[in-house]
């Protein structure tokens, strides 16, 4: 074998070693000594062959070599770009869903819910087969947060795990978070994994508390149980969103329970008692939340309460002649919504309200009102006062032009309580509040202590109480006594007598604070003119300034300038800063939109659920569109329609084509 042939075969040995090393490394997932040695050896052999070829025949200088090198480099760059695009596509997902209801992408509510998860959750699917649609839905959830995981389990292959979850049959889907487990649904050939049910179970298993929603009853409101005009679907939807519901009869209870997150008045047909209106007002004043759904021709006697919030109900009927023809003009169709958290993601979605009334707002200080539901402008919609006529027409004198507002959201900040009557005063004890200084110069009387009667030389009392005394006819103050700033407000008709000095044995006045029968008060002594005012004396009020020449009594219980200041008493009634609350109210001019049969139509259910969610002031819960299921696009034809379709396709259309062909033939002839 010549050197030329040896070099020719050597070049193939190098790529073989590189391929063998890469194959061993990828298959074994262990890049140890052998795979690396093979790859390095192959690269070295290829390098030596290239160097030898260049030395023997000036291989690098050939035009064919340069063209081949350029082609190889371009190919490597193209492969690198494709690999980078594939890597970015794996790491960052960009998908566009062109289906009408976005069937292959999760709803905004689902994205917000999964991204706000604070603890890991895992979905267990106990089934022997994997539905591609179900797996795609779970992968969409997993892309939103690493805290959401899922796993398919064969219950026959892992019976211990299936027994742990108490799996009864294949197709059961469970949601697990920490030590809590809940059944989501059971899958079969006709039923795939529901995004709505998965969201509801996520809310239930991650929520710490359940909020309570009360529905007012006793005035002809919609029933919560099944039946005509009931709201069972709305109640079930609230339960799925981790709310508990109950009825409330204010005629039997004088106030609304403290655990009420939201109170709903759904279609009252009769008037409320004044006590019931007062209970609703008190509930709002303490930071409550109220949802009012009031139909036309109903007067629940809430006008006074609504007027405080700047709301006035229009008793005329909203008409929409440009709405859905099958529903009729008395069913306004709303496609325009206000900028509010309740309706922020509705876009141009549709909701409708059978027999609705307009809701007007007036500006009120402290109330922020936001329109929610807006009808089309005139002449497409108006409010008519003639509700008995079958042919609805606009009457300029009595009717009102659109657009109309059918729903309003209102907020009111609860003002902090005003600290009335607070004055600068010394720190008192609960049994003896201090009194303001007297401008009439009455002498204070020392407060007796039962365990140790005071004397003129006794030390001041550490309690910091203000000495007070009301003079009696038998014990007027001395003319030499200067006016004391600590006397309690005597009447102007009783000035001090200049001829009667105080008696040492005089008993305490019946108006003196804290009298003790077994311990008489100490006799007052004339004050020293040279004694300076005490630095610990109470601050005078602006209406009664102290006299600069009035020295304190030697029997005053206040400390002298040499005494340290007394510490504040733990019983001091210091005012605490109030906590500001917010009251919320939503007023809708219709209640039938949330009843069974209409609740799941278009955005009707979203209006109700989002209103309750916003009213409950749970900002951590997402406000968005509920997940939509796949729409049923089947067309069900009657016998007449099927016959007409067959006749048109088998007879009419061929006859039209034959006639057109005959006309063309005749013209060309």
Image (cartoon, rainbow, N blue to C red):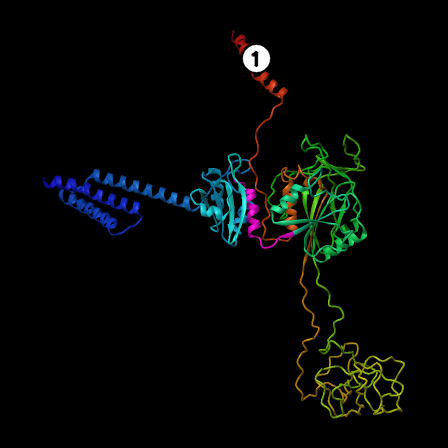
Question: Going by the image, does 269 lie left or right of 624?
Answer: right
Relative to 526, is 589 above or below? above
Mark 1: secondary structure: helix
**Is residue 25 or residue 72 the one in the foreground?**
25
Residue 403 visible: no
Residue found at the very far top of the displayed protein: 669
Q: Say which residue appears at 58% left-offset and 27% top-offset.
A: 635
Image side of residue 669 versus residue 606, left or right: left
Mark 1, other Cα within 10 Å: few <14 / some 14–19 / many ≥20:
few
Q: Nearer the viewer, residue 523 or 56?
A: 523
Residue 328 is left or right of residue 503, and the answer is left
Q: Position of residue 430 (x, y in %)?
A: 73, 76
Q: Is residue 524 above or below residue 52?
A: below
Range covered by the magenta-colored residues: 193-211
Image coords of residue 381 (percent x, y): 71, 36
Q: Dot 1 corresponds to which residue?
A: 655
């Amino acid at each position: 074998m010549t050197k030329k042939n040896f070099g020719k075969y050597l070049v193939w040995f190098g790529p073989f070693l590189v391929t063998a090393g890469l194959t061993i490394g990828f298959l074994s997932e262990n890049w140890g000594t052998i795979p690396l040695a093979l790859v390095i050896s192959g690269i070295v052999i290829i390098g030596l062959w290239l160097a030898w070829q260049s030395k023997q025949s000036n291989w690098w200088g050939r035009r064919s070599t340069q063209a081949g090198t350029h082609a190889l480099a371009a190919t490597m760059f193209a492969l690198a770009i494709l690999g980078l695009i594939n890597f970015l596509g794996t790491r960052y997902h960009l998908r566009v869903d062109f289906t009408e209801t976005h069937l292959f992408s999760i709803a905004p509510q689902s994205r917000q819910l999964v991204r706000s998860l604070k603890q890991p959750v895992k979905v267990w699917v106990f089934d022997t087969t994997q539905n591609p649609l179900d797996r795609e839905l779970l992968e969409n959830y997993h892309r939103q947060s690493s805290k959401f995981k899922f796993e398919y389990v064969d219950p026959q292959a892992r019976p211990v795990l299936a027994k742990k979850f108490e799996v009864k049959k294949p197709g059961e889907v469970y949601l697990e978070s920490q030590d809590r487990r809940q059944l989501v649904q059971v899958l079969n050939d006709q039923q795939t994994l529901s995004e709505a049910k998965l969201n509801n179970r996520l809310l239930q298993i991650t929520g710490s508390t359940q909020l309570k929603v009360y529905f007012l009853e006793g005035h002809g409101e919609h029933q919560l149980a099944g039946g005509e005009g009931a709201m069972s679907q709305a109640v079930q939807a609230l339960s799925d969103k981790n709310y508990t519901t109950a009825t409330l009869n204010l005629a039997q209870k004088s106030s609304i329970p403290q655990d009420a997150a939201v109170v709903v008045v759904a279609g009252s047909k009769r008037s409320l008692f004044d006590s019931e209106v007062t209970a609703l007002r008190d509930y709002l004043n303490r930071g409550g939340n109220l949802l009012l759904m009031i139909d036309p021709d109903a007067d629940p006697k809430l006008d006074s309460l609504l007027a405080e919030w700047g709301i006035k109900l229009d008793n005329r009927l909203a008409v929409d002649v440009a709405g859905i023809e099958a529903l009729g003009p008395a069913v306004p169709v709303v496609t325009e919504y206000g900028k509010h958290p309740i309706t922020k993601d509705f876009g141009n979605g549709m909701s409708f309200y059978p027999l609705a009334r307009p809701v007007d707002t007036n500006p009120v200080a402290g109330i922020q009102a936001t329109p929610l539901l807006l009808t089309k402008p005139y002449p497409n919609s108006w409010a008519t006062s003639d509700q008995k006529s079958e042919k609805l027409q606009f009457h300029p004198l009595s009717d009102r032009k659109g657009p109309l507002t059918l729903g309003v959201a209102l907020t009111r900040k609860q003002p902090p309580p005003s600290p009335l009557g607070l004055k600068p005063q010394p720190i008192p004890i609960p049994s003896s509040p201090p009194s303001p200084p007297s401008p009439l110069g009455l002498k204070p009387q020392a407060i007796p202590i039962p365990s140790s009667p005071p004397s003129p030389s006794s030390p001041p009392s550490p309690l910091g109480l203000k000495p007070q005394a009301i003079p009696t006819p038998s014990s007027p103050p001395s003319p030499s006594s200067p006016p004391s700033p600590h006397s309690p407000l005597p009447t102007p008709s009783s000035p001090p007598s200049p001829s009667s000095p105080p008696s040492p044995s005089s008993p305490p006045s019946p108006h003196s604070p804290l009298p003790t029968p077994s311990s008489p008060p100490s006799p007052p002594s004339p004050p020293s003119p040279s004694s300076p005012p005490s630095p610990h004396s109470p601050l005078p009020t602006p209406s009664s300034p102290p006299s600069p020449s009035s020295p304190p009594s030697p029997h005053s219980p206040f400390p002298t300038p040499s005494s340290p200041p007394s510490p504040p008493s733990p019983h001091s009634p210091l005012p605490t800063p109030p906590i500001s609350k917010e009251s919320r109210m939503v007023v809708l001019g219709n209640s039938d939109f949330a009843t069974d049969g209409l609740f799941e139509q278009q955005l009707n259910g979203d209006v109700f659920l989002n209103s309750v969610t916003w009213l409950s002031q749970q900002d951590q819960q997402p406000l968005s569109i509920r997940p939509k299921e796949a729409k049923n696009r089947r067309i069900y034809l009657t016998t007449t329609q099927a016959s007409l379709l067959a006749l048109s396709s088998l007879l009419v259309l061929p006859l039209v084509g034959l006639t057109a062909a005959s006309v063309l033939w005749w013209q060309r002839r």
